[in-house]
Image (cartoon, grey):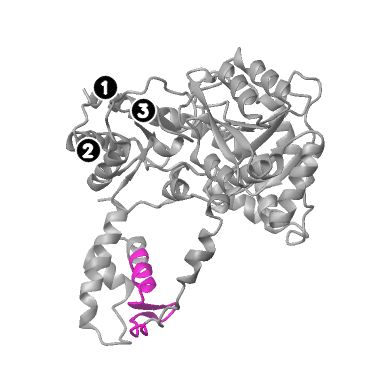
Amino acid sequence: MKQSSSVAELVGMLRSELERYSIGQRLPSSRELVARYRVSPVTLSRSVAVLAAEGLLDSRPGAGVFRAEPRRPAAPTGDVSWQELALSADEGARGVGAGAVLSMLALPAADVIDLNNGYLHPSLQPEQAMAAALARAGRRPGVWGRPPAEGLPDLRAWFAEDVSGGGSTGQPLTASDVLVTGGGQAALTTALRSLAAPGAPVLVESPTYPGVLAVARAAGLRPVPVPVDAEGVRTDLLADAFAATGARVFVCQPLFQNPTGAVLSAARRPEVLAVARAAGAFVVEDDFARGLVHADAPAPPRPLAADDPDGVVVHIRSLTKTTSPSLRVGALTARGPAWDRLRAAQVVDGFFVPRPLQEAALELVVAPAWRSHLRRVAAALEQRRRAIVGQLASLTPLLMPSHIGLGGYHLWLRLPEGSDGGELAAAAHRLGVSVTPGRAYFAAESPAPHLRLSYSGTAGTSQLVEGVGLLRRACAEVGIATG
């Protein structure tokens, strides 16, 4: 039995047993409860925490666990109906539209297989290395002092070397080109707010990461889609889009694009830079998958920023995807006056990234364990990709993706014409697997129905195999042929 299921079952049993105890009465000791219900101490501890959060138990360290006093009825809520008018007065300019982002961040129920999550499962996160890095950082003198607004110099230097290492421009990036940010999403927000005026068009790949669309719309920008194929963005259409819209910003993911997994081809890399330069525009390069290259993949191409001495590329790198959702440390890299604009926007928004978090991130990435962790993640992601692709080929051959990236953590499935990705996702969730419908990845109308599957957030390959089986059942339930 999965531990998460054990917790849910024990919570139910304890809840039904509470009527036997009077208010304030002490429950049996942990040892007695472990023996009675035949569970582990960890399962019992987590179950007690759930009931304490519900207000049914009162856990007192050193004294025991007691039946809690009933909570007082909630105070009457105020009248917030006035906000409907206040918030709708300029909804077109200020509406955020974070539904797709919130759905990606939603935590599934304990009994649901998560093929929606974009973060590493805890078993793949470098928890011990992060804990050790945090402990070392905590011992540094002045760790709670105010950091430079741009970020710690040593951390900025590490990002500069990581982004430009091996570049052929003869002008490698330096620490002075780097701004430490609170993760990749914060970097996207800073970049778009800094480089485009409210109401302006911004070119985005189609399909693209929904977080880009949410950031653009929240900044009052107008996302304009540019189609992507197996070689990355269509550069002929990119030139047309710049000419038609007058846009000054293009946001792309050249490496293992989310959701298609495409890698920008060698032929198109210089074309993207040339087209943007001719349009007098910036390329915002979201390099989110740099640390997620699979063990069986060839060496990935350098970032676009490494071959751009002219400041066309504003590069985004984050440590979050390769570590933990809570290690929200990233970097914006830019040359020229754009860097000053980026720094001003970030300072106004949040002053700076907390120094203890920066110190811990620096301790982590310079430790010998960092390279070992990246190799372990590379091997695990390759194994997971092979498992889920093999199961798709066996059970749902008609849904097999046309392109399978050797990096990242996701697959992009095209559904048969006339299918409803949202309906399929709902049916899958009822059966116990969480998947992502493709509609939210398009800035305009979707040319076809799609589904995205993530394979980074499960405990192992057995859950991936089971999840595909449940997806097949969901397809049958809504009338989608799978082969």
Numbered-mark total = 3
Q: Residues within 10 Å of mark 1 (few under 14, many from 20)?
A: some
Q: Label 3: which residue?
A: 448
Task: Based on the picture, tell me whether residue 65 belongs to the magenta stretch.
Answer: yes
> Can you identify the residue that label 2 sits on?
474
Query: Where on the picture, by quarter, is residue 364?
Result: top right
- Badge 2 crowding class, 10 Å Cα cut-off, few under 14, some 14 to 19, many 20 or more, is many
- Percent from the top left, x then y, of residue 210? 49, 40
Tell me, yes or no, whether the highlighted magenta stretch contains residue 173: no
Q: What residue type is labelled 1?
A: Pro
- Residue displayed at 30% across by 86% down: 25
Mark 3 vs mark 1, foreground winner is 3
**Mark 2 belongs to which amino acid?**
Ala
Q: Left or right: 304 with respect to 106?
A: right
Residue drawn at the location 24% of the way across and 84% of the way down = 21
Which label sits on residue 397?
1
In the image, is 112 to the left or to the right of 337?
left
Residue located 58% across and 20% down the image: 299
Name which quarter of the figure residue 404 lies in.
top left
Query: Which image quarter holds the C terminus?
Result: top left
Cα–Cα gap, marks 2 and 3: 19 Å
Q: Which of marks 2 and 3 is in front?
A: 3
**Picture coordinates of residue 188 (x, y %)?**
62, 42
Q: Distance between the residues labelled 1 and 2?
A: 15 Å
Q: Is 171 on the left-hand or right-hand side of 123?
A: right
Quadrant position of residue 249: top right
Q: Dots 3 and 1: beta carbons under 8 Å?
A: no
Give whichever of discs 2 and 3 has the lower sequence position.
3
Q: Position of residue 239 (x, y in %)?
A: 62, 20
Q: What element carries label 1?
A: helix
Judge the density around disc 3: few (<14), some (14-19), many (≥20) Cα neighbours within 10 Å: some
Three-letter code, disc 3:
Ala
